[in-house]
Image (cartoon, helix red, strand yellow):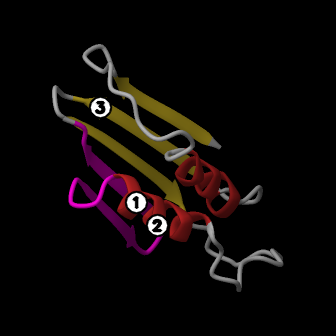
Amino acid sequence: MLLETNLEVTACDHLIVPMLLIPFVENAFKHGIDPDEKSWIIIDLSCSADHIHFKVRNSLPKTLYQDPERKSPGIGLNNVRERLMLFYEGRHQLSTTVLENEFIAELTLKVS
């Protein structure tokens, strides 16, 4: 498994709501790692004076392994969406993309 982090946070002194980014990383490990295939997780975090940009990319297994939660929609991303509406309404952009072999979650927060 490959785990890559790209953290550009030297100009980042922003505070955000606790536990907002954790579900993205948890989901990447939970749904993106297959012990029988080449798997990867790439995490990018960057800041500017008024924005935080967070992106998590992970591989998608070719075969669906036995995961009892795989058929349920889960609550992680739904909780994040609700929290974004509560705390960052009109000041965030969240996108999720499923490609052939990759899942991408990308979040931008306007923090000032």
Mark 2 and mark 1 in contact? Answer it, CB < 8 Å.
yes
Q: Is residue 80 visible in the rendered structure shown here?
A: yes
The Cα atoms of the two marked residues, 2 and 1, are separated by 6 Å
Residue that label 3 marks: 46
Give x and y (percent) for residue 108.
27, 49
- Type of residue at label 1? Leu
Q: Is residue 102 left or right of residue 19?
A: left
- Quadrant where the C terminus sits is top left
Give x and y (percent) for residue 94.
32, 61
Callout 1 crowding tier (Cα within 10 Å): few <14, some 14–19, many ≥20: few
- Type of residue at label 2? Glu
Query: Which stretch is magenta?
Result: 88-111
Q: Secondary structure at mark 1?
A: helix
Closer to the eye: label 1 or 3: 1
Return the residue nearer the eye: 46 or 61. Answer: 46
Q: Is residue 46 left or right of residue 4?
A: left
The Cα atoms of the two marked residues, 2 and 3, are separated by 23 Å
Closer to the eye: label 2 or 3: 2
Which residue is found at the position 58% from the left and 53% from the top?
Answer: 23
* Label placed on residue 86: 1
Residue that label 2 marks: 82
User: For the view shown, which residue lies furthest in the top direction?
Assistant: 10
Q: Secondary structure at mark 2?
A: helix
Mark 1 and mark 3 in contact? Answer it, CB < 8 Å.
no
Residue 101 colored in magenta in the image: yes
- Type of residue at label 3? Ser
Which residue is found at the position 21% from the left and 60% from the top?
Answer: 90
